[in-house]
Image (tube, rainbow, N blue to C red):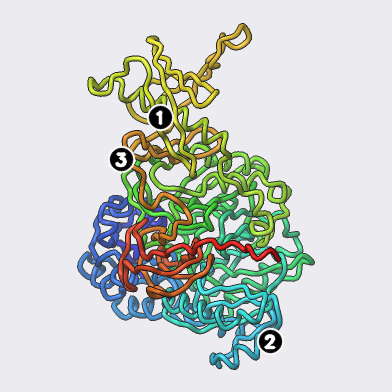
Amino acid sequence: MSDFKSLLVANRGEIAVRIMQTAKRMGYRTVAVYSDADADALHVRTADEAVRIGTGPVTDSYLNPDAILAAARITGAEAVHPGYGFLSENSAFSQACLDQGLCFIGPPPAAIALMGDKRQAKQAVAKVGVPTVPGYAGSAQDLARLTAEAQRIGTPLMIKASAGGGGRGMRLVTDLNQLEDQLGSARTEARNAFGSDELILERAVNSPRHIEVQVLADHHGHSIHLGERDCSLQRRHQKVVEEAPSPFVTDALREAMGAAAIQVAALCQYQGVGTVEFLVDPEGQYYFLEMNTRLQVEHPVTEMITGLDLVEWQLRVAAGEPLPFTQEQIRFQGHAMEARLYAEDPYDHYLPQTGPVWVWRTEQSPGTRVDTGSVTGSDISAYYDPMLAKVIAHGPDRATALRKLDRALDQTIVLGTRTNKRFLRQLLQHKDFKAGMATTATIEEQRHHWLPLDAETLREHACLAAAWLCYRRRGSAATRLTGHSHLTLATSGQQLNLQVTEDGNGWWQTQLDSHSRRYRFQGTAPPYIMETTPSTETDDAAAWIRRTPLWIHHEDDAIWLDQGPGVSVLRDLTHQPPSPHAASGDGAILAPMDGNLLEIRVQPGDSVTTGQVVAVVEAMKMEHQLKATVSGRVTELTAIPGQQVKARALLLSIEPQAETGDDSGS
């Protein structure tokens, strides 16, 4: 408990902004910390004061306790809010705050330490009768013991980082012949992410629900729960869409899980806001998964159905206030959903994306909310998590909340960096999710439904982009059109040759093969007003004009366009020579994004086969394996492990193996 007037937020991005908004409303002075990569970030602009704490890598900045504590001393901050991620579940950091007379906005260090170690937490909750998933959570961590325990548990088997979360250090094993490789990979990722390579093993629960219960406890021994959130829609063991309440949970199951969550909170003498997570099998049996001793990414859906500001109650509890309500007084109103907007390509193994944000725009209407740290001009760094924003909607019922969330996503415009917006909208419209039947297996099992833009839509976007390019260039004497203009645009492996003609009345006729379209534009910056008519005027069609906003941005040779069912990225190749690495499968291994080259697993002269892992790049706190696109011989290494590489940098070259025919006649 503490009386404080100023608050340092030891985090970045959307959560730092969100905490500061509530803190300011409550009258607190706010302090931000930032790395060199975040010098102009929104959370820095939002704070009353900001302190540089290091260079871009998290170990030199947001994971540097000494730098953050020094920032508190310099600014006179009296309390520290860790947000989530980074140092939020680091018991040594929370103790260091207390030792320096700072109020740590979170539970006691002992609670963080106990629940932050999945092995110890699982053993502790089992002793008080809370169900746990069968597995191994022992201290012996040698390969022989883990192998023996894995054979005892059987497959499907889940490997988890004992100190981890967010899907890092987690592996699903379906073939024990792959166990040693999977254990090694999980250890490395866990060590890099959490500083500990301890693992636990669990029997994988088939098609479970991921249900978590929000708890709130004060310093006076009073604990309540605020209902559950369903976080079952996940990719790579990371949540994508969350909702409250769960369409699966009955009143009886809610009461049982709520009681178990409060029991876990009491076990570790919890104080503040925390979350107890469970797996629930198809029969309704629940198992303790872990306790997150911090604010959760998905806390807004609980706020929307309870009317409570959870950050406000974190601050009130830290200041020593007792909870003024009982469990019976908590009422749930309506339904809320949240979608996580990531800078990633969901159609290329969810590969994280880096780069600039040329255009950022959101629409917030009654019952919707966007929590973000991004603005036009932001830069998506390889150093940090790729989440750009949380888009949240609330309605009187689930169907209304879903409809409002889908519209809010549609009206969220990001140009300059690929995102998962289209994928999120596909998830929301899938029959299993609409029926409330989605599980943690849904995204993988239904992967054939998650499709990028089809070829015809890409061609439509190319026609539109070509007409718009001519519209933008028409005022320049050097580029003024006299008759026809010929353009070459590329998108998703297609190279398209287009002809554009201006008719003198502001209309641009675009011809692609045998298809033609007509467009007219207004404006000098996005959103442009776009009008279209049928390309061939007939009695039935000549009367109508379709008028819609057009979000489009041209930078260097890239054209970013958000129109209709999704975003296209086109390249203007009209005046450019072909790229030496344009062809896929040519043996050039390129960095998929900005990042750190962890490993090169081959040497010049080595023979490789298609699909063989040849290098590993670390970016956005994840490891990404790069595989040979051809079979052949390694001819050259152009980068070394430990090197920071830029997106599309050449790492190594493979000389494709010559095709050999069989002319033996057999």
- Residue 434 point in image, percent of width and height: 70, 46
| Horizontal relation, residue 358 to residue 176: left or right | left
If the image is split into quadrants, where does the C terminus sit?
bottom right
Q: Disc 1 marks which residue?
A: 527
The amino acid sitting under disc 1 is Pro
| Horizontal relation, residue 512 to residue 177: left or right | left
- In this rendering, the label closer to the viewer, 3 or 2: 3
- The circle on residue 556 is 3
Q: Disc 2 marks which residue?
A: 151
- Disc 1 to disc 2, C-alpha distance: 59 Å
Mark 3 Cα shell of 10 Å, populated few (<14), some (14-19), many (≥20):
few
Q: Residue at x 34, y 48 (%)?
A: 356
Q: Secondary structure at mark 1?
A: loop
Placement of 96 over or under 14, stated as above or below:
below
The amino acid sitting under disc 3 is Asp
- In this rendering, the label closer to the viewer, 3 or 1: 3
Q: How many marks?
A: 3
Name the one closer to the observer, 157 or 404.
Answer: 157
Name the one closer to the observer, 598 or 626.
Answer: 626
Q: Secondary structure at mark 2?
A: helix
- Disc 3 to disc 1, C-alpha distance: 19 Å
Is residue 62 at least partly visible in the picture? no
Is the residue under label 1 in contact with that under label 3 (CB below 8 Å)?
no
